[in-house]
Image (cartoon, rainbow, N blue to C red):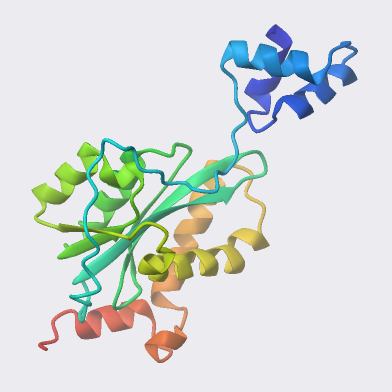
């Protein structure tokens, strides 16, 4: 059990099969069932990216989807927020970002080893230093139905909107950003550490906002559209 604990501390993304192989390589005569049982006794589980990063707790409140009947027309009418995982050489970390629906500008973000509400609030706190939206749309994950998130939205007078169950297209703008950052940066590199990943992602977001032309924006950058439209009268 001590050897299992030591291996897990070094390789927290290893499951019982790989830990069994490592133990056998060190000369231990042990099978998978034994390792799985001992890991269960120790409360150890491999860390890996889950298919659904945001799952709702049954006791939490769910809010209606607001953007269908009041589509945003100007920057800061509505932001979208979501979480994705970023692969490191050893393990995974989680990226939260808020995007302005109209300009596609990334308003705030946070990279964290923890999949929790606090990292979402850290991204939000970065964003509200720039502006304050009328609405923030999210999925129904526990991070966004938590009391801490709801209280923060209430404090700033921001309306909460949530995707319908199974309606991933409701948050399509942030999904497109995930595709861009992964194909244009993350998958081209091999981040050794959280610090290296954070620095690279910061540089990419600056590039995304201020340099990268967007076809959907008639080849303008998000910063250009944001500045041109934020005070525009309808």
Quadrant in which the N terminus is drawn? top right
Residue 36 x, y percent position in the rendering: 70, 19
Q: Residue at x 18, y 79 (%)?
A: 230
Specify the quadrant of the image occupied by residue 55: top left
Residue 231 lies, with reference to residue 191, above or below; the image says: below
Residue 119 x, y percent position in the rendering: 35, 42
Q: Name the one closer to the observer, 50 or 216.
A: 50
The answer to whether residue 14 is visible is yes
Q: Residue at x 71, y 20 (%)?
A: 7
17 sits left or right of 183 in the view: right
Q: How many marks?
A: 0
Q: Residue at x 22, y 38 (%)?
A: 148
Specify the quadrant of the image occupied by residue 58: top left
Quadrant in which the C terminus is drawn? bottom left
Residue 35 x, y percent position in the rendering: 74, 16
Q: Residue at x 76, y 13 (%)?
A: 34
Residue 213 x, y percent position in the rendering: 46, 84
17 sits left or right of 38 in the view: right
Check the image and name the residue furthest to the top. 2
The answer to whether residue 131 is visible is no
Q: Name the one closer to the observer, 106 or 53.
A: 53
Specify the quadrant of the image occupied by residue 4: top right
Q: Name the one closer to the observer, 69 or 187.
A: 69
Residue 150 lies, with reference to residue 4, above or below; the image says: below
223 sits left or right of 36 in the view: left
């Amino acid at each position: 059990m001590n050897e299992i604990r030591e291996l897990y501390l070094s390789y927290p993304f290893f499951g019982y099969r790989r830990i069994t192989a490592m133990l056998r390589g060190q000369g231990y005569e042990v099978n998978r069932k034994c390792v799985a049982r001992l890991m269960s006794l120790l409360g150890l589980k491999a860390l890996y990216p889950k298919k659904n990063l945001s799952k709702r707790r049954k006791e939490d409140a769910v809010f209606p989807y607001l953007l269908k009947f009041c589509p945003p027309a100007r920057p800061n009418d509505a932001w979208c927020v979501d979480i994705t995982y970023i692969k490191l050489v050893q393990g995974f970390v989680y990226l939260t970002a808020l995007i302005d629906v109209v300009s596609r500008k990334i308003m705030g973000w946070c990279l964290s080893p923890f999949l929790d509400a606090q990292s979402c609030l850290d991204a939000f706190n970065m964003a509200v230093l720039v502006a304050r939206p009328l609405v923030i749309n999210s999925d129904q994950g526990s991070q966004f139905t938590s009391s801490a998130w709801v209280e923060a939205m209430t404090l700033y007078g921001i309306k909460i909107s949530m995707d319908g169950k199974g309606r991933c297209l409701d948050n399509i703008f942030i999904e497109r950003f995930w595709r861009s950052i992964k194909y244009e940066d993350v998958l081209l590199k091999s981040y050794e550490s959280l610090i290296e990943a954070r620095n690279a992602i910061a540089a990419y977001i600056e590039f995304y906002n201020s340099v990268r032309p967007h076809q959907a924006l008639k080849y303008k950058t998000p910063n250009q559209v944001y500045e041109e439209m934020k005070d525009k009268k309808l």
